[in-house]
Image (cartoon, coloured by chain):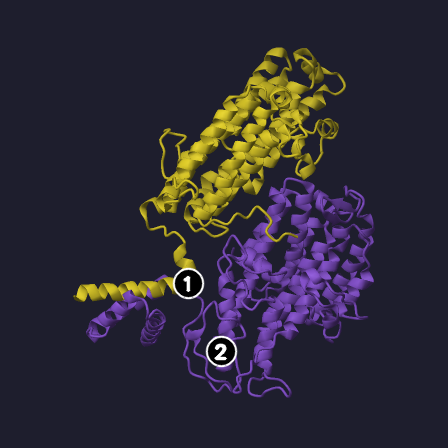
Chain colours: A purple, B yellow
């Protein structure tokens, strides 16, 4: 309670001083000053009670502000707001930023660039080449080119000496090779069907349905790859590596030649892999996204309306906790982010399966189901919910295990998968 | 003095509170009288949805009986009874098609009941294949009321020709069997939906009072918005009139193409049911209760342009739509061919209502419209 009081007091101070020029507030201050301390405290007690009740859903746990042996200056969690830019508070003793997003952002841009190429066949009606996809995936043979519309500079990525392939499914030794093989085959498959971009797809024949390129089973392969990679690269690496084992990294030593500890870097890498914006989803409402987000970052907004606005504050608070070497707070933030990412993924899987049901055309249904199937595959990275590859593969088999694939889908199959996923995730 | 000061402190604290939990407090709270969503959902379930399904079920069973009689004796009298029963059930269907949330969404009832124009080639093929898959999307237009329209009204140029279709020595029995198959399938699906509503789902519907994506209010508003836009505006007027397709008219895509005289009646029935649902008009008593209208009023939702209440503006717009429909003749097929501007006028007015439902109403209620794809890929 004392902490809550201190918090409200500091908030009051803050808002009072900010608006000192405002006559009303000045008046209020003169009221408050001579006021009996007891009444004041009672009011505050009541208030903090109201505060606790009305903010029950507040995610950030109440924590101590003491620095628990960090090498940085203590950061007061109360100074963090949803509009604090990610880099602004985290400085070393010389005043230089300790934030470095390059590693995460480079991976993020690689995914955007690969995804852009995956869409090229349907977008530009041209055949695409699986060896280019494999090169983009593994960053071999300088595959990246400039994509001005997406602010991608090819040389930056080519010279980065990092790649997406290595981190694919890296939290699961047993799955890692399977996923790489699976993606490798999908690249070949997408390349093979891209020569049918001028045909109309029908049952048993690849081609286009509306704007979407589908295979002979009516599956939009580019979407399967994209959604699989959202799980296998972004979700797995951010949630199951960086925000899990990554939190055990050293936080006492500055890496030689850098401004940050390994723990600081891990957290920043996670942030950069999620978003390229200094404030993730700044100014967003449920109806309108306030920033340009891509891939995972976009689907969190679309499929976790309850929590998307809390993701950024959690990243910020976690970063402050690293400066304070406050591992409990740090883990609480990581756990929150992981929980909400998994929820978004599950909602997306179920949401797209349901969009197959409401789709009015084959094109709309094909697009929805491919997104849905890709997300169902990616549920295997939802480790907090204990999802296994077997569970996902079982659902996928129930949905599209026939030769006709998409063309054979029924409402009953979709409902079975929706029910199974909803039950697993308690949706 | 003390009271004054206390008040000031409270006011200041409330400012702090508001800034601290902005997103949570913006949402309407269900503790206010007109904002009590459980009461609204309960009224909808008990006074409109369940009774409407029951009324439809009565008409449907009459049609099922008439179908059996016709199958037993495919004669002129039984055909005539079946035709009337079909009209009556189809008209009543318009009053439940809008409940495309919960059990009906789960079964995708509409997909199996009312996707038109009927796929007559598919129907003819299915007649010869008694195990044709009626669950896949390609079969949607081969079953339901539009398929029955074809089978009951459209398989011959006149009544005798229709009868001859069923008394044909080679294929008559197969045709009757398909008629039976479709009605049985519709009956089974309807049974699932009605049973689900009357047992497990009703309580769930009333209990899920939130505004999140899975909440009843969200599912309901999304279902209603989609229904009005895609199946009333586009399906009944936009597509046949060509308003949806660069002016290319498609009179053959009107609802009830083989019994064209009822096409406007079906649209009016659907529209009235929609308006009554919005206003919470009980199917049992005809009296209005807690509804989307009362909820919008309790939220004090206003039309940005005129400052009038949103519910009033919506009702006025519904009235305009209805009046435009009333200017048309019964046979919408002929209207497309001879008075298409009248059809387009309905479309235009309904489009204005779509915006009010999908944009103004949903945002006033803090409901996310989920049936459109936001990611743009």
Q: Is residue B58 visible?
A: no
Distance from label 1 to label 2 (Cα)? 21 Å
Marks 1 and 2: which is nearer the front?
2
Tag 1 and tag 2, C-beta contact below 8 Å: no
Q: Residue at x 55, y 48 (%)?
A: B370
Q: Secondary structure at mark 1?
A: loop
| Above or below, comparing residue A39 to residue A296 in the picture | below
What mark, if any, has residue A321 been given in the picture? Answer: 2
What mark, if any, has residue B202 been given in the picture? Answer: none
| Above or below, comparing residue B372 to residue B85 in the picture | below
Nearer to us in this view, A40 or B198: A40
* In-image side of B371 versus B317 (left or right): right
Q: Quadrant of residue A375?
A: bottom right
Percent x, y for residue B19? 39, 64
Q: Residues within 10 Å of mark 2 (few under 14, many from 20)?
A: many
Percent x, y for residue B223? 52, 41
Q: Which residue position holds label 1?
A: A57
Q: Is residue A39 visible?
A: yes
Nearer to us in this view, B100 or B64: B100
Q: How many marks?
A: 2
Q: Secondary structure at mark 2?
A: helix
| Above or below, comparing residue A61 to residue A120 in the picture | below
Label 1 chain ID: A
| Above or below, comparing residue B157 to residue A160 in the picture | above
Percent x, y for residue B262? 56, 20
Percent x, y for residue B241? 62, 28
Please state, as top left, top right, bottom left or bottom right, where the N terminus of chain A lies in the image: bottom left
* In-image side of A59 versus A354 (left or right): left
Label 2 chain ID: A
């Amino acid at each position: 309670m004392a902490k809550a009081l201190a918090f409200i007091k500091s908030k009051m101070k803050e808002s009072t001083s900010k608006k000192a020029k405002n006559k009303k507030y000045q008046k209020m201050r003169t009221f408050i000053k001579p006021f009996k301390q007891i009444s004041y405290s009672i009011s505050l007690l009541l208030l903090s009670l109201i505060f606790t009740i009305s903010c029950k859903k507040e995610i950030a746990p109440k924590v101590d502000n003491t620095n628990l042996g960090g090498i940085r200056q203590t950061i007061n969690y109360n100074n963090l707001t949803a509009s604090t830019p990610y880099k602004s508070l985290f400085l070393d003793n010389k005043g230089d930023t300790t934030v470095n997003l390059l590693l995460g952002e480079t991976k993020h841009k690689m995914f955007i660039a690969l995804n852009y190429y995956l869409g090229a066949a349907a977008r530009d009606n041209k055949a695409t080449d699986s060896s280019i996809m494999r090169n983009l995936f593994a960053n071999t043979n300088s595959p990246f080119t400039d994509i001005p519309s997406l602010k991608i500079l090819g040389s930056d990525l080519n010279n980065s000496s990092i790649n997406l392939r290595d981190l694919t499914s890296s939290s699961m030794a047993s799955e890692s090779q399977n996923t790489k093989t699976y993606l490798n085959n999908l690249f070949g498959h997408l390349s093979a069907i891209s020569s049918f971009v001028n045909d109309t797809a029908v049952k048993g024949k690849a081609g286009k349905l509306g704007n979407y390129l589908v295979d002979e089973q009516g599956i939009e392969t580019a979407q399967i790859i994209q959604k699989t990679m959202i799980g296998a690269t972004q979700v797995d690496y951010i949630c199951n590596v960086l925000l899990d084992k990554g939190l055990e990294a050293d936080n006492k030593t500055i890496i030689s030649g850098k401004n940050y500890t390994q723990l600081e870097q891990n957290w920043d890498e996670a942030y950069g892999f999620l978003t390229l914006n200094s404030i993730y989803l700044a100014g967003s409402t449920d109806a309108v996204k306030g920033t340009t987000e891509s891939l995972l970052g976009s689907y969190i907004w679309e499929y976790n309306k309850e929590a998307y606005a809390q993701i950024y504050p959690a990243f910020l608070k976690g970063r402050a906790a690293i400066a304070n070497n406050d591992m409990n707070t740090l883990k609480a933030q990581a756990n929150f982010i992981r929980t909400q990412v998994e929820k978004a993924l599950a909602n997306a899987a179920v949401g797209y399966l349901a969009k197959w049901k409401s789709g009015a055309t084959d094109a709309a249904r094909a697009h929805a189901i491919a997104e849905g199937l890709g997300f169902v595959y990616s549920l295997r990275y939802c480790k907090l919910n204990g999802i296994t590859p077997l569970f996902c593969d079982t659902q996928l088999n129930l949905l599209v295990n026939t030769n006709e694939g998409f063309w054979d889908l029924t409402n009953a199959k979709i409902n079975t998968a929706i029910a199974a996923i909803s039950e697993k995730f308690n949706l | 003095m003390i009271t004054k000061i206390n008040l000031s402190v409270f006011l200041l604290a409330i400012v702090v509170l508001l800034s601290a939990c902005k997103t949570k407090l913006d949402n309407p709270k269900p503790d206010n009288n007109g904002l009590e969503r459980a009461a609204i959902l309960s009224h909808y379930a008990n006074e409109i949805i369940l009774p409407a399904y029951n009324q439809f079920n009565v008409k449907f069973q009459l049609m099922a009986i008439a179908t059996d009689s016709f199958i037993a004796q495919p004669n002129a009298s039984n055909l005539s009874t079946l035709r009337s029963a079909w009209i009556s059930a189809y008209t009543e269907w318009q009053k439940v098609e809008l409940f495309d949330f919960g059990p009906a969404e789960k079964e995708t009832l509409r997909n199996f009941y009312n996707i038109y124009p009927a796929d007559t080639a598919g129907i003819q093929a299915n007649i010869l294949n008694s195990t044709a898959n009626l669950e896949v999307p390609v079969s949607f237009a081969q079953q339901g009321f539009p398929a029955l329209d074809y089978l009951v009204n459209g398989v011959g140029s006149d009544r005798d020709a229709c009868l001859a279709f069923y008394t044909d020595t080679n294929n008559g029995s197969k045709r009757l069997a398909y008629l039976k198959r479709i009605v049985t399938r519709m009956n089974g699906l309807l049974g699932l939906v009605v049973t689900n509503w009357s047992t497990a789902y009703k309580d769930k519907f009333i209990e899920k009072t939130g505004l999140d994506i899975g909440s009843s209010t969200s599912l309901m508003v999304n279902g209603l918005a989609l229904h009005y836009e895609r199946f009333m505006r586009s399906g009944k007027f936009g597509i046949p009139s060509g308003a949806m397709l660069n002016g290319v008219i498609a009179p053959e895509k009107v609802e009830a193409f083989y019994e064209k005289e009822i096409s406007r009646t079906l649209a009016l029935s659907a529209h009235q049911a929609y308006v009554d649902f919005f206003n919470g008009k009980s199917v049992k008593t005809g009296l209005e209760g807690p509804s989307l209208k009362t909820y919008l009023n309790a939220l004090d939702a206003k039309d940005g342009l005129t400052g009038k209440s949103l519910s009033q503006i919506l009702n006025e717009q519904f009235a305009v739509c209805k009046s435009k429909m009333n200017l048309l003749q019964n046979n919408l097929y002929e209207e497309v061919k001879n008075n298409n501007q009248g059809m387009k006028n309905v479309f235009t007015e309904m489009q204005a209502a779509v915006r009010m439902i999908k944009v103004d109403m949903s945002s006033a209620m803090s409901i996310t419209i989920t049936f459109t794809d936001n990611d743009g890929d």
